Structures are given as structure tokens and as C-alpha cells.
Amino acid sequence: MSAAPSRPSGGQAALVFPGLMLGAFFVVPFGLMIAVSFFQRVQGGFYEPVLTGANYARFLSLFFGEILLFSLGLSALVALVCLLVGAPFTYLLARLPRRAQVPWLVALLAILSLSEVIIGFSWSTLLSRTAGVSNLLVALGLMASPTAFTPSFAAVLLGMTYQALPYCVLVLYPSFSRLDPSLGEAAQTLGASPARAFLTVILPALRGALAATFVVVFVFALGSYLLPQLLGRPQHWTLSVLITDQAIYQSNMPFAAAMAVFLVLASLLLVSLAALFGAKRAGNAA
Amino acid sequence: MTTTPIAHPTRRSVLLGAAAGAAALATPGILRAQDRSLKVGVYGGYFKESFDENVFPAFTQATGIAVESIAEPTGEAWLVQLEQAARANVAPADVSMISQVAMRKGLSTDLWAPLDLARVKNAGDILAPFIVKYPDERVAGVGAVAWYINLVTNTQAYPTAPDSWAAFWDPANEGKLGLLALVSNSFLLEVTAKTFFGGTQVLDTDDGILKVMDKLAEVKPNVQLWYRDEAQFEAALKSGEIPMGQYYHDVTGLAASKGEPVRSTFPKEGGISDSGCWAVSRASQKLDIAHEFIDYMTQPATQSLLARKVGTAPVIGRSLLDLTDAEFAAVSSTAEPIVPRYDLYVSKADWLNQKWTELIVG
């Protein structure tokens, strides 16, 4: 990094606006949510500002514990699959000539313009019995009769991975494109195969970027509430689905808020663990 | 851009004028009380479009009262908005179409302005289930429209129509059903109670409800889709992907009339009868005009118009209407319906929701 001339006053002033925005649109709503999570639910009405721990007590059960674990596990799996697909893809993409990269990046950005609803409906059609890919497999003689692949856990995982992959690639892309190509060349000069060079030299060199991408995709996947409904069975519904039910259909804001607080706490914990892991390993490697 | 000195006062006066205009609009002054207009909330989308096109113009022509229609969100979000606005003495809509569960929740906070049935000519003809009252007999809501949720099938997958809700439990239908995902909108507890326990009174006790839930749990292997989104099930029913389930009688009939291979059957236990009420926010200043509106909406001619143009079932007796047999059958049935136990979704809302979620997720 080149040493920038220090302008402490200007730097502080520049932070005021983002700080205010963060306060107005994140800290205040989040504080309100925490406050509401301690309010008393009035059944058949709304809620009263009477402090109670009942909403948290209701959440502390095996039933919701399993759903929280499932949601965290599903999001981690989505992040992992995204990395497994996204890292080799981005590596190969970054090595293409600039002109050839553009169509790929445009296609990825185009996926971002699709809403979750459209993605969900498209996948449920693609995986359906009447119009889906199994008909192709039957035509090719690979299957006896068309089958529905949705609703299923695999369908939820597929849909969420599809939705998150562009983010994964776009976060990885700068690191991969900045990577010194001589690293891989040196490994291959020393006798490593391209695959071995990728696994033992390139990936460890980009550990920090990979950890950051994992966190981004994990948090993104955690908020998904439509795809699990459209592509999964009730046992694949995430905590976000149940929060939506409570907030919109039961008008039970205090309980919805308490569940959301649990989700935020659990994900903060996992994210800081991941960040710690990334920083430590990067430090060791240096 | 060049600003001449002359432009300044002009711009400012324009702004001042606009501010004064906005203030005048916002002041609930004598002028506003005298104009004959009404803000009416109806569900956004198809409902609002049909009302705007066919019903409100006829009302304005008959009474000279202008209607400003407001799109309501579904679920209970509208109830929350009305309630919070009423605390600030504001009414986002004077009259709203309100679901039965939301009506009852509004009773607990005195949200609805009491209505005077003497000012509604056809009040005596409105069927009893469609009038919602406070515990002290004050009238809070008057039936607006009704609709049925029925047993629906894809005609290609099921050449003969099933005649009973018990078809849901038939092991032959494994992986074939699409059912509504929420306890408070699927009314499957009532269906199970009527089909296997002789009526909905079994739901009076917690033990009874749990017994009904145990019976209902037996359908789980048959359910391919628990849907919140109606479009998802409708598409799957038309294509035959999910060839059986519960769905709206009117929409299914509309699809069948356009050549889709679907049918809606009134089972021998009865279709599920659900409905919406007209209710007036206590913050509304236009209770008198609201009475005129409700009076118009409950007249036999208007109820026939609603059946023909919006596809809803009438809230007054069939004999008063000039609907043909075909027109009546498209929206309703004279067979005894399954009437949802709305009281449970207020008094036991959280318990039912918890048990239901455990039932279908577990």
C-alpha cells in the first residue's frame, strides 16, 4: 500500500454520513427489534410494552433448536458448495483473456437481476414430474418414468446455491484476478500438476478471500425464506420461514423478534469463528 | 441552469401554494366532511380490480358518493395498520373488507365503529354467520362477500370426481395433495372434525383438538406441497403435477371455464365457507356515508352483481337473488357448509400455531 497523506479531520468527516446511515437504518431498527422481543404478546391483539422473557423461553425448546441447527447447517452447506464450484470457476475465469471474461460476468450479473420468486418457480418447474428434466432422462432411456425431484432437500440446496453463486464468484473475482500468475507457474516448474498447483499453492494463498466469501454466502443464505418454501417440504423450512409466519400471519411480533435475535446471535458467533479461523491461518501462512 | 431574480419569487410562491394546498388537504375541515366520498379498503390485486371496474362505479352512479379504493395487503398486516392509525385518530380507509379472524381480533381493541343495522335495509336477510358482533351485541361488521374452499382435482388424473374430503386420507393418493400451510387459513382441523368426528364441536376442548390433529397427521405422506403461495398450487394443479388438494371454488371454476383440466367439488361433508366483512374504523369521520355504502352492498341486486362479476358467494339467501342455477353454482352451494371455528384462532392462536407447526414440520 502506498502511504496516503494523513488527513484526520477530512477522514472523520467522511465517516459521518455512512455512520448516520448505519445508525438510522441498522442500529435503530435492530435496537427496536431487540426491545420488541422482550415485549408481551397479547393473543388475539398485538403486543404491550411490558417486559417479559416468555418469547425467549418459548424458543428454547428441542423443536426450535433443531430448526435453528438445520438453518445454520443448510446455510453452511450452501456456502461450502458455492466455494467448491465457485473457486475453480473463478480461477479459470480470471485466467481467460479480458474479452472472454465479460460475457461470463454479464451472465452472472444477470442472475442477480432475477428475484427469488422467479428462481424458485423456475427450479420447481425444471425439477417437476410433468415438465422437468426427468422427462429428458426418460427420452434418453436413462430413467423408466418421469419423477418429481421437488420438493426435496436437494432441490432446496440446488436453488439456494444457484442464487448465491454469483455473489460467491463476484467476491472471489478481485482476489483471483490480482493473484500473481507466476505463483502457479513456479509450482508447475517445480513439477506440480495444474490441479495440484491449484490445491496446494493457489488456494492457500487466497485463504483470506475464501473465508470472507464463505461468510458472505453463509449470511446471505441464512436470510432465504422463499426458496425453502417453494422447493422444500415442511421439514426443510428454515427459521426464516417460521419468523415470516409469526410476523406476517400470526402478527406475533415479539416472538418473531426473539427468533430473529437468536438467528442473528448464532450467525454472529459463527461468522466471528470463521473470521478468527481465516485470520489465524493467514497469519500462520505468512 | 440560470436563475433570474424574477424566477425566485415565482418558485417560492409555487412552493408556498403547494404547501398551503397540502395543508388544506390534510385538514379534516368542514369542507371535507361535506364532500360525498368514501375511502374503501379491499384486497389488492384481482379483488380491487374487479371492484374498481364493476362495483364501485355502479355505487357512485346510484348514490353520488365517490369511492377511493385502497389496496389492502392480505394477512393481518392491514389490521395492524388500521389499529396503529386509529390510535393516532387517522383512518387509512373508512370502510374495509376484513377477514373473519381479523374482525375478531379488532373486537378486543374496540377498533370497529358500531354499526346501526336499522340503517341497512336488507340487514334481516343477511345470513347469521356473516354478522360479527361485540360481546354486548353491538354490530362490528356486516358480511361483504363469501367464498368457498373446496376439494379440487385435475380431471385428467382423476376422471371421476371424489365425493368426500376422506379422499385426502386414501393411501392411493400418496404424494398427490396440495394443502394450505397455515392452521388459520387451511381450516383443515374443521374439515377433519366434520369428516371423522361428526362436527366441529369436537374442537371445543384441547384434548379434542389434539385428537383431530392426530387424525390429520395421517394425511402427511399424501401431501406433496404445503402451500402459502396460491399461484404455486394453481399451476401445479393445472399441469397435473399435484393433481388433488384444497383450493378456491371460484378461481378453480374460472380456470375450468377457460379449458384447464381442473374441477372443484363440494364434498358431501360440505365446502369450507369463508368470508369477509365490511367494517368501519373507529377513527373514520364518515360513519353515515359508510352506512349508505354497506346498505348498497347488501342489496340483492348488488350481491348478484358481485357473484357475476367478482365471483364471490352471496351473503344473503339464494331466494332473494336473480341468479340462474348455473350462475349460483359457479360461486356457491345450498348444501350445508363447513363453517370455520374462527373463535379458536383468536383464543388459542399461539397454542394452535405451535401444535400445527410441530404437526406438519415434525
Image (spheres, coloured by chain):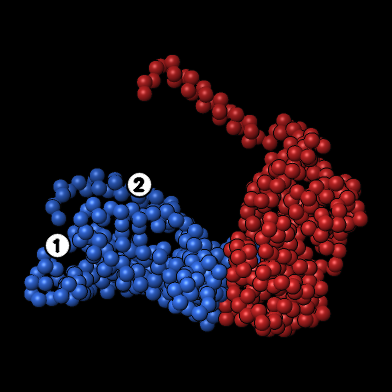
Could you tell me how far apart the alpha carbons at marks 1 and 2 are, in whole angstroms?
37 Å
Do the residues under discs 1 and 2 have CB atoms within 8 angstroms? Answer: no
Q: Quadrant of residue A267?
A: bottom left
Labels 1 and 2 share a subunit: yes
Q: Residues within 10 Å of mark 2 (few under 14, many from 20)?
A: few
Image quadrant holding the N terminus of chain B, namely top left
Q: Quick one: SS at disc 2?
A: helix
Q: Earlier in the sequence, mark 1 or mark 2?
A: 2
Depicted A142 relative to depicted B105: above or below: below
Residue B208 seen in the figure: yes
Camera-nearest residue between B147 and B80: B147
* Label tally: 2
Chain identifier of the residue bearing label 2 in the image: A
Q: Quadrant of residue B225?
A: bottom right
Depicted B299 relative to depicted A184: above or below: above
Where residue B323 sits: x, y (%)?
86, 52
Inspect the image, locate mark 1, and give the three-letter code of the amino acid beneath it. Asp
Residue at 67% from the left image edge and 69% from the top image edge: B156
Q: Quick one: SS at disc 1?
A: loop
Residue at 35% from the left image edge and 57% from the top image edge: A108
Residue on which disc 1 sits: A180
Q: In the displayed structure, does residue B125 sit left or right of residue B133? A: right
Residue sticking out furthest to the top: B6
- Chain A: what color? blue
Q: In the displayed structure, does residue A162 sit left or right of residue B49? A: left
- Chain B: what color? red
Chain identifier of the residue bearing label 1 in the image: A
Where residue B310 sits: x, y (%)?
74, 51
Residue on which disc 2 sits: A17
Residue at 86% from the left image edge and 53% from the top image edge: B324
Where residue A37 sits: x, y (%)?
53, 66
Inspect the image, locate mark 2, and give the three-letter code of the amino acid beneath it. Phe
